[in-house]
Image (cartoon, rainbow, N blue to C red):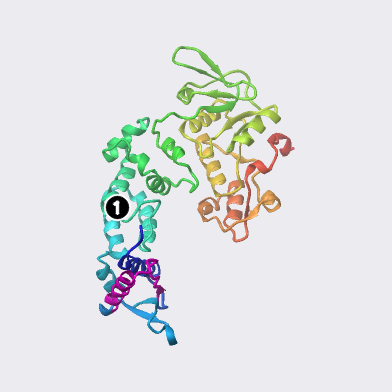
Amino acid sequence: MTVSGAESARKALVRLLESADRNATATRTLSVAAGSPKDPSPAAQRAWRERLEAAERFGAVALVRGAGNRREVIERVRLLDADRLAIDLGMTRAGTRTAAAVAAAREAAAGHGGLEPAIDDAAEKWAKGAEWYRLPAEPELVRSVFGAAAGLLDVAFGTHFRVASAQTAGSSKFLERNAAAVCAILRRALALPEDARQHEIWETLGLVRFGHPVCLRAPVRFIDPAGVGVTGRAVPWSAVNPDLVAGCTADGDQPEFIITVENWTSFNGQCREVGRGAVIYTHGFPPPPVRMLVGRMAAFWPHVPIYHWGDVDAGGLLIADSIREAAGRPVKLHLMTAALAERHGARSRSLARVAGIAARDDDFGELARYLSGDSCRTFEQELLRPMDPLEMAQ
């Protein structure tokens, strides 16, 4: 369908208003191409011109015409008054929409101070006329999304995902439909890595879907509800229903070391190429069953050293820190050093998210100080072959 002349003119004016909202602090005069309609008919051309000239008479814009024999041709539309242009278009400016959306978000987040960083981040996007994680500055929707995120922080651990959605938003499918924004809020509220995936966030809150099996190789044993034993000793590794982790027991001699591995390829390599040690796959950022398993194994063998091997980047270090918290005792980084990053990594911007770890007087602090620097490099752990951490320590 051909766009009418008046519609073509309106599109140009809307583009100009959106540019004004995106560049609220700009000192230069903003303008856009006039964009004459594709319909060459005299009626369409006349409607296009009349719509632009009406905006000019209203004092919202100035029309820039060509020179010489093109002096009758409207080439560009220059902004004079964005507020007048918004009135002329019957639109609400981004700043006004943002204020209403922020007020709705703060109302929904009352009593949950951890949601403020997300509100500030969203406001910055909305003020420029953009969506924030697919969430537009629509007060009612914003209120529902932030209300759902706040409600999830109070939902009982072990609640089914759809039940939690109904409890916090009144619809069992609300979280699925608005997952990008809800998860963005929760990442900030829970101080999770920016690359934490949606299913990892739901698992962190203990929302029940159909969780991934816990993958490991270790001298431990699990008992299912029917009383059947499930071993963690399988070669190259065992897969265990996450519901069984709470009943984990030691099974035989203690391992020489415990190592958690962030990525799937490296986990398989560690199990297949290094013949000793207990190995646990973290699934990226470790979900609750994995953290529980780490804690139980750390308690079974309090003198066995624990290592973590992951990506050398902000996410990898924060994952390692979550493993340290789950273990409740020191964890050593494996193949995660500044020297290896300098040798194998690609240049990265300073990773401020790990600055809170930089004050520590251990290998975590050393790597955090490196990653917080202006000339750091990062790499994924798959670039390195698995190695025995005890052999490296010799």
Identify whether 348 is placed above or below 270.
Answer: below
Q: Is residue 354 left or right of residue 95?
A: right
Residue 41 in magenta stretch: yes
Whether residue 87 is visible to the viewer of this picture, yes or no, is yes
* Quadrant of image for the C terminus: top right
At label 1, the amino acid type is Ala
Q: Quadrant of residue 307?
A: top right
Find the magenta span and give its range.
Answer: 30-56
Give percent across and percent down for residue 385: 70, 38
Image x and y of residue 59, in percent: 27, 79
**Residue toward you, 335 or 268:** 268
Is residue 53 toward the left or the right of residue 363 in the image?
Answer: left
Residue 382, quarter of picture = top right
Task: Describe residue 385's horizontal placement relative to residue 371 as left or right.
Answer: right
User: Which residue is tagged 1?
Assistant: 105
Quick one: label 1, few (<14), some, or many (20+) residues within 10 Å?
Answer: many
In screen coordinates, is 297 left or right of 16?
A: right
Write the residue at 42% across / 45% down. Answer: 190
Q: Is residue 67 visible?
A: no
Q: Residue furthest top?
A: 227
**Residue extending furthest toward the bottom:** 68
Residue pictured at 34% horizontal, 54% vertical: 136
